[in-house]
Image: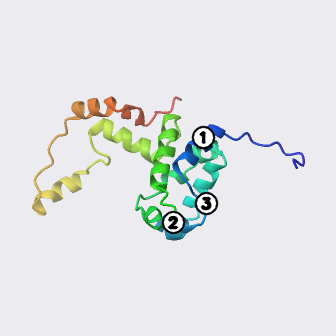
Amino acid sequence: MNHGKEEKPKDQAFSQAVTHMTPCYQCGTCASSCPVAKITEHFNPREVIRLSLLGERNEVISGDAIWLCCSCYNCHERCPQKVHIPHVLYMLRNIALREGHLPNIYSEFGSALWSNGRLVNVSRFVENKRPILGLPPLQPIGVEALRRILASKGLDKLQKKEEVQ
């Protein structure tokens, strides 16, 4: 019964794609063995799979949960149905990425990698500590070669978009 609430349209093709990848029957073994689910209520692999099977495409790909999996494979190793939950999450991440749903931290990493060849800038302090620790000086990064590699895989789009003011 509707009771005056409008039903959200379900994405059947999305649901079928996930169903094809997973014979999940929602036993909860994945959630009980997930180290991330133990420390945050923002990630529950069982819930991500459930929402996907129900066709809740927009909720799944625009949310942060699919990005929280640490790829430890505990869920897959313990799943009685041998569902490859990390692979399902990778598929969902790829869909999200294609549609522009990317957490800011990843676009910041992409921008830094594109700009200077490193995910994190190395400070002068760290550079000065390297010889003291017996480490060689950092060599310059071949940023142009790296950019060609990133662009060939479409990762040039991961650059952080500068806000237009």
Percent x, y of residue 40: 54, 65
User: Which residue does the image show at 27% across and 39% down from the upper left?
Assistant: 116
Residues at marks 2 and 3, CA–CA distance in whole angstroms = 10 Å
Which residue is identified by label 2? Answer: 80
Which residue is identified by label 1? Answer: 14
Tell me: residue 10, above or below residue 149. below
Percent x, y of residue 105: 44, 47
Residues at marks 1 and 2, CA–CA distance in whole angstroms = 24 Å
Q: Earlier in the sequence, mark 2 or mark 3?
A: 3
Q: What element carries label 2?
A: loop
Badge 1 density bin: few <14, some 14–19, many ≥20, Cα 10 Å: some
Percent x, y of residue 99: 53, 34
Badge 2 density bin: few <14, some 14–19, many ≥20, Cα 10 Å: few
Percent x, y of residue 29: 54, 68
Is residue 43 in sight in this rendering? no
User: Which residue does the image show at 65% across and 46% down from the upper left?
Assistant: 56
Is residue 132 in sight in this rendering? yes
Disc 3 marks which amino acid? Tyr
Q: Is residue 125 left or right of residue 39?
A: left
User: Which residue does the image show at 48% across and 44% down from the upper left?
Assistant: 91
Badge 3 density bin: few <14, some 14–19, many ≥20, Cα 10 Å: few
Q: Which of marks 3 and 1 is nearer the N terminus?
A: 1
Which residue is identified by label 3? Answer: 25
Tell me: residue 63, above or below residue 78. above
Q: Which of marks 1 and 2 is nearer the N terminus?
A: 1
Q: Is mark 1 on a helix, strand or loop?
A: helix
